[in-house]
Image: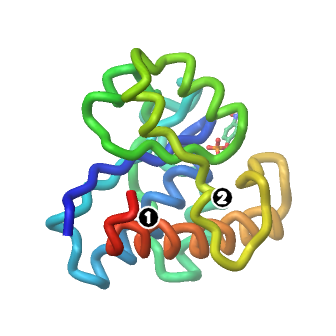
């Protein structure tokens, strides 16, 4: 299989993208592909730089067996050099990331998470920050589904 470096991006890097990172890391590890796939996450805004993921997201994820322990950081244009695939959660993330793309080659690395959905029909991964428990559960459902789709595409060398 080809080697991949994937970066998940949301707004704050404390809810959606660290959850995607933790879920995808667990799936990749279970398939013993951790030597082929490098995973990280970042946020388009820097408000939470250095923070652990949101405690609500950590709690909901931990009930499903995922440990979220990444430290928030801001997405920068250097990430286009470091990663092959940049997966954003919503249209605002898409716009903010594309704005920093230096060239067409970089733009081609950017994908929406829902592009990889297999069972859900959602046009974005909704920001759970101001939602209740059901918002966090929905995000985890959507991310598990899309992470499976993403891994399948990598295994089939479709990316
Ligand atoms: P995330 O959620 O983009 O999924 O990490 C958010 C976290 C923090 C804020 C917004 C969204 N905030 O406004 O502080």
How are the residues colored?
A: rainbow
Q: Which mark is residue 62?
A: none
Q: Is residue 3 left or right of residue 27?
A: left
Query: Is the residue marked 1 within 8 Å of ligand 1, measured from its CB?
Result: no
Which residue is pictured at 79% across the width and 68% down the height? 121
Q: Earlier in the sequence, mark 2 or mark 1?
A: 1
Which residue is pictured at 68% across the width and 74% down the height? 141
Query: Is the residue marked 2 within 8 Å of ligand 1, measured from its CB?
Result: no
The quadrant in which the N terminus is found is bottom left
Q: Is residue 126 left or right of residue 59?
A: right
Total number of numbered discs in the rendering: 2
> Which of the two residues, 149 or 79, is positioned nearer the viewer here?
149
Q: Which residue is mark 1?
A: 22
Which residue is pictured at 84% across the width and 61% down the height? 132
Which residue is pictured at 78% across the width and 54% down the height? 123
Are the residues tagged 2 and 1 within 8 Å (C-beta)? Answer: no
Residue occupying the far left of the picture:
35
Image position, residue 7 (x, y; %): 40, 46
Image position, residue 78 (x, y; %): 32, 22
Q: Which mark is residue 114?
A: 2
Frontmost of labels 2 and 1 is: 2
């Amino acid at each position: 299989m080809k080697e991949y470096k994937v970066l998940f991006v949301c707004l704050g890097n404390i809810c959606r993208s660290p959850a995607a990172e933790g879920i995808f890391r667990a799936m990749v590890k279970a398939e013993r592909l951790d030597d082929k796939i490098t995973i990280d996450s970042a946020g388009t805004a820097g408000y939470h730089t250095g923070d652990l993921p949101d405690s609500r997201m950590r709690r909901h994820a931990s009930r499903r067996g995922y440990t979220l322990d990444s430290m928030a950081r801001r997405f920068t244009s250097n990430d286009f050099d470091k990663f092959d695939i940049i997966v954003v959660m919503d249209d605002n993330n898409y716009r903010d990331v594309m704005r920093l793309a230096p060239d067409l080659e970089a733009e081609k690395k950017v994908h929406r998470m829902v592009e990889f959905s297999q069972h859900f029909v959602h046009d974005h991964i909704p920001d759970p920050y101001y939602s209740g428990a059901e918002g966090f559960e929905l995000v985890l459902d959507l991310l598990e589904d899309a992470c499976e789709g993403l891994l399948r595409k990598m295994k089939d060398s479709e990316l």
